[in-house]
Image (tube, grey):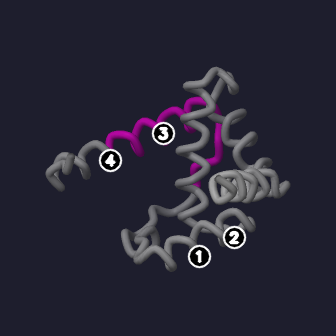
Amino acid sequence: MSLPTYWAVSFWEAALLFSCAAAWASGVNTDSKMAAAAELAGGDRAHNREIAIQILEGAPGPRRDIVLVNTAAALMAAGVAADPAEAMQFAATSIDSGSARTKLQQLAAFTQAS
């Protein structure tokens, strides 16, 4: 199902505002600048793969920030973290320790074995 662009933009803006409000309320540092759309844009499959690898290798920037916010929301929804600050720390630790990349490699190996 394809959503109209105006609806998708409104949804993502609302999600970003919610994430920022939740982070601010919990004391997470939100001093980063707003990213331009070009800084977040993907591309073809090869380009998106490279972006994912860079993020999993710990490259800083707005793409990593978005991954951390989305992962934090998932961790909170799953009940793994009590607040946005804790969830963001779990997400950052998973990337920075190499655990997230290792898990992705294990998933890739599993899916290619069958």
Q: Earlier in the sequence, mark 3 or mark 4?
A: 4
Res 27 → quadrant: top right
Under circle 1, the secondary element is helix
Question: Is residue 23 found inside the magenta-colored segment of the image?
Answer: yes
In this view, 80 is above or below 13: above
- Mark 1 and mark 4: Cα distance apart in space: 26 Å
Residue in the picture at 25% in, 52% down: 9
Foreground mark, 1 or 3, reads 1
- Mark 2 and mark 3: Cα distance apart in space: 21 Å
- Mark 1 and mark 3: Cα distance apart in space: 26 Å
Q: Is residue 46 left or right of residue 26?
A: left
Q: Residues within 10 Å of mark 1 (few under 14, many from 20)?
A: few
Q: Nearer the viewer, residue 26 or 59?
A: 59
The residue carrying mark 4 is 13
- Mark 3 and mark 4: Cα distance apart in space: 10 Å
Instruction: Name the kind of residue labelled 2 in the image.
Output: Ala
Residue 21, given in percent of the width and then of the height, sits at: 47, 36
Q: Earlier in the sequence, mark 2 or mark 3?
A: 3
Under circle 3, the secondary element is helix
Give the label on residue 19, or none: 3
- Mark 2 and mark 4: Cα distance apart in space: 24 Å
Residue 109, given in percent of the width and then of the height, sits at: 72, 58
Residue 45, given in percent of the width and then of the height, sits at: 46, 74
Residue in the picture at 57% in, 53% down: 67
The residue carrying mark 1 is 50
